[in-house]
Image (tube, rainbow, N blue to C red):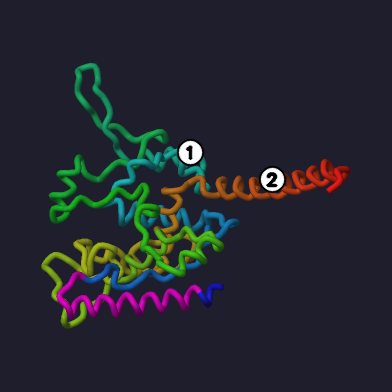
Amino acid sequence: MKTILKGLAALGLGVCIASSAFAAEEGETPHYPLKKPEQMDWSFAGPFGTYDRGQLQRGLKVFREVCAACHSMDLVAFRTLQDLGYSDAQVRALAAEYEVQDGPDAAGDMFMRPALPSDHFPSPFANPEQAAASNNGAAPPDFSLIAKARAVERGFPTFVFDIFTQYAEAGPDYIHALLTGYEEAPGDFEVQPGTHYNPYFLSGAALSMAAPLSDGQVTYDDGAPETVDQYSRDVAAFLMWAAEPHLEARKRMGFNVMIFLVLFAGLVYLTKRKIWSDIKH
C-alpha cells in the first residue's frame, strides 16, 4: 500500500511541476505548492498511533528556542504540558520563565507577573500590529492549530486510499517539508527582496520567513540527531499534539465504538434469525 501511495504521490508531483511550468510559459498563475510534501512516518499515524513523548519534548524545546521568538500559541495552556510527561513542579517552573499581563491592580493599572500553569503561552508581541510591523508587514500565524489548518490537498485517487489508511498527517508533513525545503531559486525565477524561495510553500514560490533552522542550533539532552531534518520532525509532531492533544483518547474511543458496532450487528442478526425462524416463508 505504501509503495502504491508513494508512486501516486510521485506521479502527482510530476503533474504539479509540469502544470506549473506550462502555466509559467503561458503567463498564468502556477499552482502552489510547486512540490508536494513527502508522506512521512509518524508514531501517531494510523488508527492505533500514539504520540512519542520524547519527540514531543524535543519539539517543545525547538518551539521555545526558535519558533516562539515570532509565533504565538494562544490556545495552549502550560498545564497541558503534563501530557508530555512533565511533572507538576516542572510545568510550574517552565511557566514561571514567561511573563503575562494581569490586572488591573488596586490602582487600576495592568501589571506583569510570572505565568502560572493555568496561563497560556504568551505572544512575543503586544498586539497584531506590532507583530506585523516587526515582520515585513505580515503578522506571523499563531501555532495553536497550525498543524490542522495547513495541509496540501492530495487529490484523486490518493484521497481514496486515505479513507482506508486513516491518513490525517497532512499538516505535519507540510510543516516538515516547508522547514526543510529552502533551496536556491531556479535561474529563471526572480526572488523578490525580503523573500526566500521554498517550492513547498502553500501560498507561493517564496515567503518572507527565512530558513529558521540550522544544524546544531538546538541542543538535545537525549542524544537525538541535532539536524534540521530532526528538528523539523520534532516540532511538527509537537504542533500536531498542540492542535489535537486528545488524539490518542479519540482513537481509543473510535476503536471501542467499532468493536461495539460489530458486536451489536451480530446481536441484531441473531435476533432476526430467532424471530423469523418459526415463520413460514
Q: Main secondary structure of the magenta part?
A: helix
Quarter assignment of residue 234: bottom left
- Mark 2 crowd level (few <14, some 14–19, many ≥20, 10 Å Cα): few
Query: Which mark is nearer the camera, 1 or 2?
Result: 2
Who is closer to the viewer here, 39 or 181?
Answer: 39
Secondary element at tag 1:
helix
Say which residue appears at 56% left-offset and 73% top-offset. Answer: 1
Residue 230 in the image: x percent, y percent?
42, 67
Q: Is residue 47 above or below residue 95?
A: below
Who is closer to the viewer here, 266 or 98?
Answer: 266
Magenta-colored stretch includes residue 18: yes
Q: What label does residue 265 carry, if any?
A: none
- Mark 1 crowd level (few <14, some 14–19, many ≥20, 10 Å Cα): few
Q: Is residue 152 left or right of residue 83?
A: left
Residue 167 in the image: x percent, y percent?
50, 61
Say which residue appears at 88% left-offset and 43% top-offset. Answer: 278
Q: Is residue 119 above or below residue 124?
A: above
Residue 135 in the image: x percent, y percent?
17, 54
Q: Which residue is mark 1?
A: 89
Q: CA distance from mark 1 to mark 2?
A: 40 Å
Magenta-colored stretch includes residue 239: no
Quarter assignment of residue 121: top left
Q: Is residue 103 left or right of residue 280?
A: left
Amino acid at dot 2: Phe
Say which residue appears at 65% left-offset and 49% top-offset. Answer: 258
Q: Is residue 125 left or right of residue 255?
A: left
Q: Which residues are magenta?
A: 5-29
Secondary element at tag 2:
helix
Q: Which residue is mark 2?
A: 260
Quarter assignment of residue 30: bottom left
Who is closer to the viewer here, 167 or 227?
Answer: 167
